[in-house]
Amino acid sequence: MEQAIPDNNKSSARSGGQPLAMPRLQLIFHHPLYGQELSQIDHLEKDRIYCGHGLDHLLSVARIGWIYAAEHQLSLDRELWYSCALLHDIGRARQYTEKIPHQKGGKELAKQILRDCHYDEKEIQSIAEAIEGHRGSIPPAPKTMAELLIWADKKSRNCFCCSASGSCDWPPQKRTDQLCW
Ligand SMILES: [Fe+2]
Ligand SMILES: [Fe+2]
């Protein structure tokens, strides 16, 4: 099937024109700060009965969002989108330990990681803005990366079969109350 979305994998265009040893998405995944924060999230959420914020969730958001983008012919850079999704909850451990709202703490962590992984300032800014705004109300028809992040973040949650839904503080408008496809 024809793919309408441009897939501009820019990894080889970074590092002063020299190909990178690793695609930028892999650089994020292998960044020490990223690994450290993800491990902390896993550790701090090990007894959590509500939704988790580990790698499974981050990849669900990335994939659900990318499917939506493909089906709706959004003009979205796949590498940028996956980077955004992989980083969007990276501030969660700091929220637990330092009471910093994770969209704010995560934005700063993401900027630091992205700079080390050869993203340019424009790219960093667009990801940072999406992370900072990802707790907003759900757009009915997402068009931008920031809107798609809010949408995919909620759609990734299986509220319709969650055993903790009785005590979850999510309002009805945020919940995925039935199987979506
Ligand atoms: Fe979040
Ligand atoms: Fe999330």
Image (cartoon, helix red, strand yellow):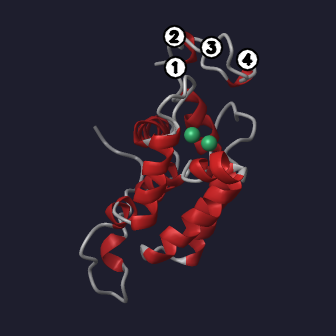
Mark 1 Cα-neighbour bin, 10 Å: few <14, some 14–19, many ≥20: some
Badge 4 amino acid: Pro
Spatial distance from mark 3 to mark 2, Cα to Cα? 8 Å
Q: Which secondary structure, mark 3? A: loop
Q: Which secondary structure, mark 1? A: loop
Spatial distance from mark 4 to mark 1, Cα to Cα? 13 Å
Which residue is rendered at x = 26% and y = 80% of the image?
19
Q: Could you say which disc has been placed on residue 78 in the image? A: none
Q: Which secondary structure, mark 2? A: helix
Which residue is rendered at x = 62% and y = 53% of the image?
94
Q: Which secondary structure, mark 4? A: helix
Q: From the image, tell me which residue sits under label 4.
A: 172
Q: Nearer the viewer, residue 72 or 40?
A: 40
First in sequence, mark 3 or 4: give its number. 3
Q: Is residue 48 above or below residue 34?
A: above
Q: Is residue 129 above or below residue 54?
A: below
Badge 2 amino acid: Cys
Spatial distance from mark 3 to mark 4, Cα to Cα? 10 Å
Report if the CB atoms under discs 2 and 1 are less than 8 Å apart.
Answer: yes
Q: Could you say which disc has been placed on residue 158 in the image? A: 1
Q: Could you say which disc has been placed on residue 161 in the image? A: 2
Mark 2 CB near ligand 2 (8 Å cut): no
Task: Point out the image quarter for the N terminus.
Answer: top left
